[in-house]
Image (spheres, rainbow, N blue to C red):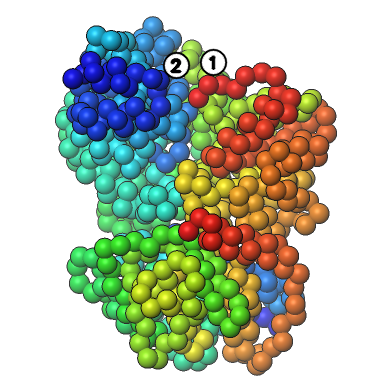
C-alpha cells in the first residue's frame, strides 16, 4: 500500500498529493514521521511560524542534520504529509533525520493526534483573519486541549511574554521551556489598543503590565490570581534594533548574536528558534552560526534591487503583524515611500476589517508617499485617509503592473521602496517585479 | 459645537475592526469643526448617563459577552437605559447589537439577558453566516462583512435597519438586516461599517448632536475615498459572495 501511494504521489511537495495520500491512508503522517531519528518539532502560532521554522531548519543543517521541512503556505496536515512524501524513497524510507514543520494553528490538534513531536513551539496568539480562525479565545481553548493530550516526553517551547501562550503550559506534565525579552528598554508602559488578552486567561481579571512589547505581549501579571510571566529559560537581556538587523545579548551566552533581520518580532523568532534547537539537542554553537547567517523567508524582509532602487518586501496578514512591521520601520528613522496592497482572497482573509485595528496612524506619520493597490485597495486608501495621511501623498493605482511601476517611479534612484502586502498581493507584486527588471532569483519558499 | 462619545467595553467588545467606527465618528465631526471627546467605559467603571451624546458598542468573543452581559444587568445597564431615554444615540455592532436585545440564547448554557432597548431576540443556531453583505435603506446601500452564528429576530417595536440584497443579515430568512428603535441602531455589518457607509455615520452624528444642540445641518464633506471603498465593497459582494 505505501509503495503504491508513493508511486501515485511522489511529485513534489505540494499539498495535493498529500491530500490524495491522506484520503487513501489517514494515518500516513504518523507512519512517515516515526522514521525520523531526531524526531519532529512543530512550530505554531499566529505570527512568526515561517521565520522560526526556517531558523530552526538552518540550525539543524548547520549541525549536520538532514531536516525535512514544509514550505510556507503548505502548513496544513496535507502539506506536511506532502513534504514527507517528497523526501521518501521508492522503498518507503524517509530521506531525512528530523521533521521541522510549521503548522497552521487550527490544524495543530489534528497533527498532534497523529504525531507525538519531541518539541512543540508556540510563538504567539493574536487576533487573525476572523473569517478563518474565528476568535482567539476559542482557538486558545482548542490548542490547550490538544497540548494537554501530549505525552510528558514532549518539550513545550512557549513565549513567556504572551499570557495566552503561557497559559498553554497548564496541564502539560512534561518539560516547558520559556523564552522572552527581558530588556527593560523594549516596549513601553502604554496599553495598546489592539490587545486580545486584556484579561487574565486563568481568572478573567484585568492583567497588569510593567511593559508592553506588542499588543498583549510584554511583562504581565495578574494581581487577582497570581498568574504571572514565568522565568525565561532563553532570555534576551538586551535587544539592539538597527535598520537591517537586531543584536541580542542572551543570558548565558557570552558573545552578542547579530541576526540580519530587523524588528523586535524577529528577536522573539530567534529566541524561539534557539530554545527549540536546545530542546531538540542541536548544539548551541551551530544554532548561533545559523541565526547569524539567516536569510529572510517569502515576503519577510526580503530585499532586492530593481532599476536602481532598493526594495524591501514585508508581508502583512493581521493587526499584530502589521504593527510589528510598522515598529521595525519606525526604528529606521526614515521617511517612507510605500507600495501598500490589500486583497481579499481566502489566503488574505476575505474580511478586510482588520486594517482598522492596525496602527496605520503611526505609519502615516512617517509616510512621504504611498501607492495603494490590490483587490481592496480602495479600503486601504480610505484607511490612510482616516489615519491622517494627506490626499496628495496617496496615489491609488489599479492593476499590479501599473501599481508596481508607479511605486518604483515615485521612488528616486538610490532610494528605498517599502512594499507592504497581503499574501496573494505579495505573490502578484513579486511576479511583477521579476518581470520589471529584477534579474536575480527570489528565494524558493 | 461639541460632541461626546462613549466607547462601551472597548477591552472586551472590539474584535472586528470596531475601532474604525469610533475613528470615523471622530474624524467626520472634527472635519466639520465639531470638538469631539471620546471616553471609554468598561466592567468595573461607572457609566455616567448624562455625559455622552453617542454610544458605540462593538462585537466580542463569547467570554467577553458573558462579562458584559453581567455588567449590563447591574447599575451600568440602568444608566445606559436612562441615557437612551434621554435622547442619546447608539450604534451597536454584532455582539453589542445582540446584547441590546431582550435575550441572547447561546449554543450551550442559559440565556444571557440583554438590555432590552431593542425589541429583538437572538439565538445561536448551527450555521455561521460569514461573508460580504449588501442591504438597502431609503435609496442608500449599506455595505459590510457579516460573521455571526447568532440569528436575530425582530419584534414589533424594532424596524429593520435595511433590506438585504446580498448575504444573510439578521437571520437569513426574512431579508432584514439590523434594527432601529428610536436613536438606537444595531447591525451585523462590520468591516468597519461607518467608514464605508458615511451616510450612516452622518445619520448617527446628526442624532447625537440633536441631544444637546437641537437639529443640526451637517456640512457636506468630500467623500471621494469613502465612495470608492463603498463601491469596491459592492463589487466584492456581487462577485465574491
Ligand atoms: Zn488571574
Of labels 2 and 1, earlier in sequence is: 2
User: Which subunit holds the residue at mark 2?
Assistant: A
Give the farthest residue toward the right: A412
Identify the element where label 2 is drawn: helix
Q: Is residue A278 left or right of A293 when viewed as pictured?
A: left
On the image, the x and y values in percent for residue B204 come to: 58, 80
Mark 1 highlights which residue? A293
Residue A99: name its quadrant: top left
* Residue in view at x 45 percent, y 86 percent: B159
Q: Nearer the viewer, residue A300 or A400?
A: A400
Quadrant for the N terminus of chain A in the image? top left
Q: Nearer the viewer, residue A355 or A207?
A: A355
Q: Is residue B18 visible?
A: no
* Residue in view at x 81 percent, y 37 percent: A409
Task: Tell me whether the residue at label 2 lies in contact with that at label 1, contact meaning CB atoms closer than 8 angstroms.
Answer: yes
Q: Is residue B125 left or right of A272 when viewed as pictured?
A: left
Mark 2 highlights which residue? A58
* Residue in view at x 54 percent, y 35 percent: A264
Amino acid at each position: 500500500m505505501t509503495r503504491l501511494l508513493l508511486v501515485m504521489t511522489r511529485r513534489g511537495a505540494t499539498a495535493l498529493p498529500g491530500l490524495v495520500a491522506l484520503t487513501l491512508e489517514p494515518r500516513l503522517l504518523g507512519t512517515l514521521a516515526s522514521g525520523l531519528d531526531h524526531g519532529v518539532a512543530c512550530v505554531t502560532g499566529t505570527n512568526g511560524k515561517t521565520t522560526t521554522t526556517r531558523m530552526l531548519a538552518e540550525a539543524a543543517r548547520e549541525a549536520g542534520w538532514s531536516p525535512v521541512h514544509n514550505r510556507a503556505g503548505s502548513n496544513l496536515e496535507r502539506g506536511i504529509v506532502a513534504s514527507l512524501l517528497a523526501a521518501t524513497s521508492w522503498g518507503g524510507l524517509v530521506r531525512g533525520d528530523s521533521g521541522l514543520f510549521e503548522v497552521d494553528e487550527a490544524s495543530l490538534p489534528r497533527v498532534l493526534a497523529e504525531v507525538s513531536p519531541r518539541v512543540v513551539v508556540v510563538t504567539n496568539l493574536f487576533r487573525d483573519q476572523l473569517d478563518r480562525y474565528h476568535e482567539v479565545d476559542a482557538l486558545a481553548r482548542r490548542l490547550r486541549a490538544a497540548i494537554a493530550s501530549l505525552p510528558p516526553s514532549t518539550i513545550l517551547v512557549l513565549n513567556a511574554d504572551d499570557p495566552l501562550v503561557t497559559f498553554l503550559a497548564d496541564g502539560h506534565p512534561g518539560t516547558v521551556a520559556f523564552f522572552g525579552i527581558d530588556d527593560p528598554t523594549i516596549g513601553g508602559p502604554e496599553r495598546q489598543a489592539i490587545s486580545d488578552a486584556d484579561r487574565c486567561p486563568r481568572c478573567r481579571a484585568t492583567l497588569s503590565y510593567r511593559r508592553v512589547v506588542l499588543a498583549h505581549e510584554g511583562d504581565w501579571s495578574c494581581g487577582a490570581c497570581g498568574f504571572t510571566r514565568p522565568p525565561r529559560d532563553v532570555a534576551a537581556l538586551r535587544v539592539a534594533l538597527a535598520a537591517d538587523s537586531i543584536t541580542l545579548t542572551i543570558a548565558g551566552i557570552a558573545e552578542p548574536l547579530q541576526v540580519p533581520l530587523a524588528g523586535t518580532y524577529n528577536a522573539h523568532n530567534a529566541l524561539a528558534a534557539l530554545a527549540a534547537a536546545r530542546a531538540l539537542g542541536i548544539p548551541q554553537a551551530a544554532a548561533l552560526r545559523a541565526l547569524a547567517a539567516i536569510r529572510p523567508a517569502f515576503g519577510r524582509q526580503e530585499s532586492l534591487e530593481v532599476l536602481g532602487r532598493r526594495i524591501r518586501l514585508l508581508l502583512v496578514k493581521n493587526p499584530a503583524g502589521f504593527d510589528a512591521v510598522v515598529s521595525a520601520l519606525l526604528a529606521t528613522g526614515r521617511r517612507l515611500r510605500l507600495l501598500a496592497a490589500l486583497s481579499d482572497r481566502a489566503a488574505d482573509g476575505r474580511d478586510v476589517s482588520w486594517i482598522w485595528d492596525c496602527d496605520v496612524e503611526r505609519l502615516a506619520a512617517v509616510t512621504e508617499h504611498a501607492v495603494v493597490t490590490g483587490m481592496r485597495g480602495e479600503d486601504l486608501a480610505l484607511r490612510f485617509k482616516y489615519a491622517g495621511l494627506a490626499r496628495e501623498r496617496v496615489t491609488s493605482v489599479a492593476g499590479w503592473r501599473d501599481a508596481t511601476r508607479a511605486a518604483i517611479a515615485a521612488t528616486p534612484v538610490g532610494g528605498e521602496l517599502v512594499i507592504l502586502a497581503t499574501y496573494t498581493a505579495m505573490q502578484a507584486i513579486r511576479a511583477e517585479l521579476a518581470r520589471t527588471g529584477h534579474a536575480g532569483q527570489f528565494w524558493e519558499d | 459645537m461639541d460632541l461626546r462619545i462613549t466607547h462601551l467595553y472597548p477591552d472586551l467588545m472590539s474584535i472586528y475592526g470596531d475601532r474604525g467606527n469610533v475613528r470615523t465618528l471622530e474624524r467626520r465631526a472634527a472635519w466639520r469643526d465639531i470638538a469631539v471627546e471620546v471616553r471609554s467605559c468598561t466592567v468595573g467603571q461607572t457609566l455616567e448617563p448624562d455625559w455622552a451624546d453617542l454610544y458605540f458598542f462593538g462585537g466580542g468573543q463569547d467570554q467577553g459577552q458573558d462579562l458584559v452581559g453581567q455588567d449590563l444587568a447591574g447599575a451600568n445597564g440602568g444608566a445606559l437605559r436612562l441615557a437612551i431615554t434621554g435622547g442619546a444615540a447608539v450604534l451597536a455592532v454584532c455582539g453589542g447589537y445582540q446584547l441590546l436585545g431582550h435575550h441572547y440564547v447561546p449554543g450551550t448554557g442559559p440565556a444571557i439577558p440583554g438590555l432590552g432597548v431593542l425589541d429583538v431576540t437572538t439565538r445561536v443556531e448551527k450555521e455561521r453566516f460569514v461573508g460580504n453583505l449588501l442591504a438597502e435603506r431609503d435609496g442608500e446601500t449599506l455595505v459590510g462583512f457579516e460573521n455571526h452564528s447568532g440569528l436575530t429576530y425582530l419584534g414589533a417595536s424594532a424596524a429593520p435597519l435595511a433590506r438585504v440584497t446580498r448575504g444573510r443579515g439578521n437571520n437569513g430568512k426574512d431579508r432584514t438586516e439590523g434594527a432601529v428603535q428610536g436613536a438606537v441602531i444595531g447591525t451585523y455589518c462590520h468591516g468597519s461599517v461607518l467608514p464605508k457607509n458615511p451616510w450612516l455615520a452622518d445619520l448617527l452624528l446628526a442624532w447625537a448632536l440633536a441631544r444637546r444642540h437641537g437639529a443640526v445641518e451637517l456640512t457636506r464633506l468630500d467623500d471621494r475615498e469613502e465612495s470608492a471603498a463603498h463601491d469596491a465593497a459592492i463589487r466584492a459582494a456581487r462577485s465574491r459572495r
